[in-house]
Image (spheres, rainbow, N blue to C red):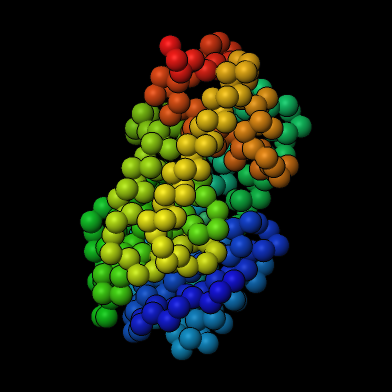
Amino acid sequence: MEPFPEVENVCAVAIDLADYSDLRTANVYAVGSGPMTLIDAAPKFPGSFEILKIQLEQAGRSLSDIERIIFTHGHVDHFGLAALIREEVGHPIPCFIHTEDAWRVTAEIYHEEMFDEAGERLMALVDMPPDEVAKIQERFSLFAMLCDPVFDVKMMEDGDVFEGEDYALRVIHTPGHTPGTCCLYETSQKVLFSGDHIIGHITPNPLFELRKDTLRNPDYLSLKEYIRSLEKVKDMDVRYVFPGHGQYVEDLPDLVESYRWHHRERMDRIWTALNKKSRPLYHIIDEVFDFVPEYDGFLAISEIMVHLELLIEEGQAELADPGPPAYYRAIRRDR
Ligand SMILES: [Zn+2]
């Protein structure tokens, strides 16, 4: 991976995830040369806390310089180490997250309800075989081990600005990957910290909301929100995008264009599969994806769901039989 470009007042720490995930790295950014803001807090892997500490020290900084931590969203790989950092410095550094994602960083969810009845109901709807469901459950319970919960998060909203001695970070609410996903824009250096909204080497997943029924807005369509959020950042005056995973990005408009193309193509594949034969969604996975790692069954279903939601909204597909398992069919485009 190419090293991050030098940006005044920004220290990038990339924690290697190559052995665990195609995300390549979990990136943490320290902004500010005196008191600093930490953007995201990496998953709690064996050794990840030490790597973060040492890399900051090598850059002449220290955990005790952190005046706040901002989570771009509420996934374990972005807040996992926050509790340990607070413990190490000996005081509760304020942690911020968008209101919509705040529930994700609390104990109850991550340690008990990661894959609750809502998950099982969804798997029955898509006709996922029991042994595959067991694999997904196992993977979800692993996630719970990659973080310590943060009980007392503070809320942030679109437009909030966090000011430091020599920096300012503006919150840009970019729902899609999760409903509370935010980017942070450093106004003087023109750096966009994009979390999982923009990633250079893979297309970010607008995730299907498993707990949709318990969310405030049941009409939230992940992919639709995601595409809208791409528009929100596409034409910004950005010198570098510093993402939550992998390498930095220079050409934001080009990348956004390639995402759009990618999602259109995926929607087409789903439409074509359902047009061939109305089926529960588990049975179209092989036609939609060229390759799915066996542990990624949930992600595959999630991707299909969010694209299908949009096809339905556009009048190109419909529910044929509510099941379970549910059957969907394509609506002929020439009709
Ligand atoms: Zn992530």
- Extreme residue in the right direction: 131
User: Vertical placement of 207 versus 203: above or below?
Assistant: above
Nearest the camera: 100 or 301? 301
User: Vertical placement of 39 versus 212: above or below?
Assistant: below
Percent position of residue 76, x then y: 53, 55
Q: Is residue 168 visible?
A: yes
Q: Is residue 16 left or right of residue 227?
A: right
Q: Is residue 222 left or right of residue 163?
A: right
Residue shown at the point (32%, 54%) measured from the top left: 233
Residue shown at the point (45%, 78%) measured from the top left: 5
User: Vertical placement of 144 versus 285: above or below?
Assistant: below
Residue shown at the point (68%, 40%) measured from the top left: 290
Nearest the camera: 280 or 56? 280
Q: Quadrant of the N terminus?
A: bottom right
Nearest the camera: 89 or 208? 208
Q: Is residue 184 left or right of residue 86?
A: left
Percent position of residue 285, x then y: 65, 31
The quadrant where residue 95 appears: bottom left
Nearest the camera: 55 or 99? 55
Q: Is residue 79 visible?
A: no
Residue shown at the point (36%, 29%) measured from the top left: 219
Percent position of residue 16, x then y: 62, 68
